Image: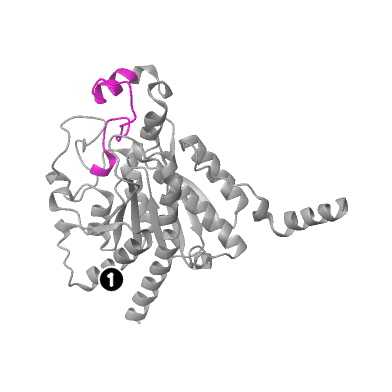
């Protein structure tokens, strides 16, 4: 009997390693920059033919903004998270997507009906943590950084030593109010560096945003998604760009947004005109005339990160999004090619 069990163990270990392989991304704990860095290296080691990564820039406080590529194709889509420090669960979500797509590709398993072999023809780029300094401050507090920074950080946090509500980078700039689209007309912003809502003195002032803009221009994705929290909502459109529902672009764009809303069960919204501008998706639509969406995960919660126990439902809503977008990107590329021919 003992020999039989040894044979069975050998069979599963050799032929079905993913069955006994432990999960890499831990979704049950606070997901830090260090965890993300360790996980992406381990995932690329396990899937060297599918996953590659690079640093877009190093922040003034020594943290790299990682970009991770999953797939082999030339058409690309781009998903990114944690522009805002307290919204680090978006990083967990995107890293879990990477792990799931890679293991499903290896084992030839579908994800909610979407087959990962699409990754032979399309690449998905992930930038899971756009604001690693802010995330670290929000999670770890003042003593994660040198003491000379403490007075200014406390001042930007309105005198509080509790940084759980922090959204900005360490210079007090709200990164999702740093993009050129309608930046000069933004309303509801702070007049000076703060834990939230300060748009800076000029667009692309923050190195995190400048790096993401340059990277986006480098890979020219067919579709982009900016993950935020919270509110269980999905935003599409950019008012200042003059988008109308009657153009072919708007019709195709809306179909993608509508399908995403159907998959996630999030409410589909167009931002009010006073809310538009300064954000990544605003800039992407204006710059590339391609679809971009902002996805707000989790129930509405203010001045804090989402609770850990909310991840399981968020995952169920979002786990197939990357593969769905990859499929749409390939269809879009093929249609454009046929139109040219």
Q: Which residues are magenta?
A: 150-177
Membership of 1 in magenta stretch = no
From the viewer's side, name the closer residue of 233 and 174: 233
Q: Is residue 72 left or right of residue 328?
A: right
Image: 106 above or below 41:
below
Q: Is residue 60 visible?
A: no
Q: Count the labels in the image.
A: 1
From the viewer's side, name the closer residue of 109 and 239: 109
- Residue at 32 percent of width and 30 percent of height: 170
Q: Main secondary structure of the magenta part?
A: loop
| Residue 78 locus on image (x, y percent) | 39, 56
**Which quarter of the picture shows residue 258?**
bottom left
| Residue 45 locus on image (x, y percent) | 61, 48
| Residue 308 locus on image (x, y percent) | 43, 40
Q: Secondary structure at mark 1?
A: helix
Q: Is residue 42 visible?
A: yes
- Residue at 38 percent of width and 35 percent of height: 135
From the viewer's side, name the closer residue of 313 and 205: 313
Membership of 173 in magenta stretch = yes
In this figure, which residue is indicated by the disc labeled 1? 252
Q: Residues within 10 Å of mark 1 (few under 14, many from 20)?
A: some
């Amino acid at each position: 009997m003992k020999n039989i069990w040894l044979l069975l163990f050998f069979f599963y270990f050799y032929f079905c390693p993913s069955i006994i392989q432990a999960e890499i991304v831990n979704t049950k704990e606070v997901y830090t920059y260090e965890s993300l860095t360790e996980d992406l290296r381990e995932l690329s080691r396990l899937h060297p033919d599918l996953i590659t990564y690079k640093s877009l820039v190093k922040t003034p406080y020594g943290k790299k903004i990682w970009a991770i590529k999953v797939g082999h194709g030339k058409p690309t889509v781009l998903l990114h998270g944690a522009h805002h420090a307290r919204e680090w669960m978006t990083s967990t979500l995107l890293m879990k997507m990477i792990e799931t797509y890679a293991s499903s590709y290896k084992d030839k398993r579908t994800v909610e009906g979407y087959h990962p072999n699409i990754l032979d023809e399309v690449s998905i780029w992930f930038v899971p943590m756009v604001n690693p300094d802010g995330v670290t401050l929000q999670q770890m507090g003042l003593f994660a950084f040198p003491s000379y920074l403490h007075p200014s950080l406390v001042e930007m946090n309105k005198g509080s030593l509790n940084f759980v509500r922090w959204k900005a980078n360490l210079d007090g700039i709200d990164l999702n109010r740093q993009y050129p689209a309608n930046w000069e007309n933004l309303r509801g912003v702070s007049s000076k560096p703060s834990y939230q809502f300060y748009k800076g003195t000029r667009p692309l002032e923050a190195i995190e945003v400048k790096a993401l803009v340059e990277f986006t221009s480098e890979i020219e994705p067919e579709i982009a998604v900016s993950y935020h929290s919270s509110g269980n909502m999905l935003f599409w459109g950019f008012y200042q760009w003059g988008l109308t529902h009657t153009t072919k672009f708007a019709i195709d764009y809306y179909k993608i947004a509508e399908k995403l809303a159907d998959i996630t069960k999030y409410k589909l919204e167009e931002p009010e005109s006073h809310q538009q501008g300064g954000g990544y998706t605003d800039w992407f639509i204006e710059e590339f005339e391609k679809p971009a969406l902002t996805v707000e995960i989790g129930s509405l919660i203010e001045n804090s990160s989402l609770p850990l126990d909310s991840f399981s439902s968020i995952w169920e809503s979002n786990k197939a999004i990357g593969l769905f977008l990859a499929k749409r990107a390939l269809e879009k590329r093929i249609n454009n090619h046929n139109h040219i021919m």
